[in-house]
Amino acid sequence: MTVSSLSDVAPTLAGSTERTFDKCRDQHITTVTIPSMCPDNATLKNRAELLQSRFQIISNSLAPYESLIHNTSKQKKNSTVVVITNALCLNEKIISSSDITVTTHMSTSKVRRLSVLAARWNGPVSVSVKIVSIEDLYEFQFGLRDHFDKFEKVAFHVYFENKDLAYPYNILRNIAFDQVKSDYFANFDVDLFPSPMDTHQHLRSMFDKNPYLKTKLENRNVLILPAFETIVEVPDKNVTLNHPVYPETKEMSLKMIKHEQIQMFWNQWKPGHGSTNYDLWKSNSTDITYPIKVKRWGYEPYFIGTKKDIPRFYRYFRGFGVDKISFTTDLIYSGYSFEVLRDFFIFHVNHPKSSKKDKHAASDLNDFCIKGFMDYLVKEYAAGSLEKAKKLPYWNKWKTRYESTGGTWMI
């Protein structure tokens, strides 16, 4: 069965649908969510067979939409997206409410990096995967086979959309977040790996010994993991669980900083992580956490939080630029405080850079889309009052950034 429009899809196949409108791109979006039906009592001995059968089910579910999604001329104005949550039924273990679930996202080319992230974390992971074709789906399946043992605790959520649309960072983050079963989550990108090894167990132990940390999380605090990056680039094919360029412990990281082998993540953009106060972190002179103030617009940390009542990422920023910064703004406006974990960190394994031309194009469009984000901020945090909105932190930074596109902001 092939469909040319959603009206051709039977209700039982389509599942639930949600229709939204992206004002920035003048685009109607229909999201079809197909529920995943996982068999009971899957055991390790039949996981390979389960993987094969699940991919066949996913393929059969997505195939009717493929010609519609590949129709680029239609998708520019009327986009169709298909989502299958927990598509592979791999994370069927009972998750404790006290667990911390990593939320992340990726394209199908990032399987190897996800395997390293999952193994180093060694706890529950919720990951959204962008799929652009049935062929892409089967390449994903092929990639999983070589690392299958690393994914027992990983829930995969398939997101199927046109390949020409900019990468939907925040939509994927929200899907992964909404599928978290624990009370706590960690917000990472798939290229960033945690230290020390078995990070989840070390964090659980720290929380058990210091229950006031959970109280902090439950009272609008987030706990930040300082982010570093390796100076040496490591191609995807050479990314492994352990590598000579990885800082495996805090002691090792301090030595590697001294010898200029690692540095603050995204070092060329100081506002991105500067508020973390790396000098204080390096000093080892604080309690197990220390409070910080967000000193400059542009802060985009990776952190642990509690799922209850936390904002979602603003879905209409796609591709490179302001996607995470907007979430930090949401946190600040929602009354969240920020503290840094003294003994934990994450690090980005640098890889060959993507096209700057593509990044700048996405960033320029996101700057134009700031208008919709500011409208949202006025409604959500200023009761619709522009005068109240003007008093919000960093309001003028967002306004200036939008006006740099030539737009004039008004309600």
Image (spheres, rainbow, N blue to C red):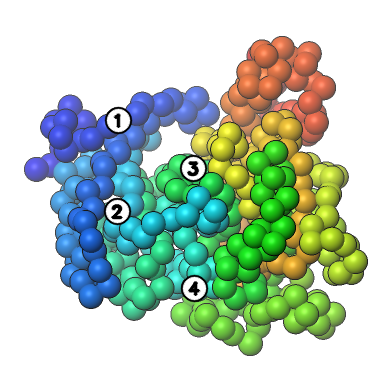
Q: Residue pushed farthest left? A: 1
Alpha carbon of mark 3 to alpha carbon of mark 4: how far? 23 Å
The image's mark for residue 119 is 4
Q: Is residue 342 left or right of residue 202?
A: right
- Where does the image place residue 177, in percent across and percent down from the top left? 49, 46
**For the residue carrying disc 1, how many other residues have a C-alpha within 10 Å: few (<14), some (14-19), or many (20+)?**
some
Q: Circle 1 sits in a helix, a strand or a loop, which is it?
A: strand
- Where does the image place residue 119, in percent across and percent down from the top left? 49, 73
Residue 162, placed above or below residue 375: below
**Residue placed under numbered mark 1 in the picture:** 17
**Identity of the amino acid at label 2?**
Ala
**Identity of the amino acid at label 1?**
Thr
Q: Is residue 74 visible?
A: no
**For the residue carrying disc 3, how many other residues have a C-alpha within 10 Å: few (<14), some (14-19), or many (20+)?**
some
Alpha carbon of mark 2 to alpha carbon of mark 4: how far? 20 Å
- For the point 45% across and 48% down, the residue is 181
195 vs 246, nearest the viewer: 195
- Where does the image place residue 341, in percent across and percent down from the top left? 75, 60
Alpha carbon of mark 4 to alpha carbon of mark 1: how far? 35 Å
**Residue placed under numbered mark 2 in the picture:** 87
The image's mark for residue 174 is 3
Marks 4/1 in contact by CB < 8 Å: the verdict is no
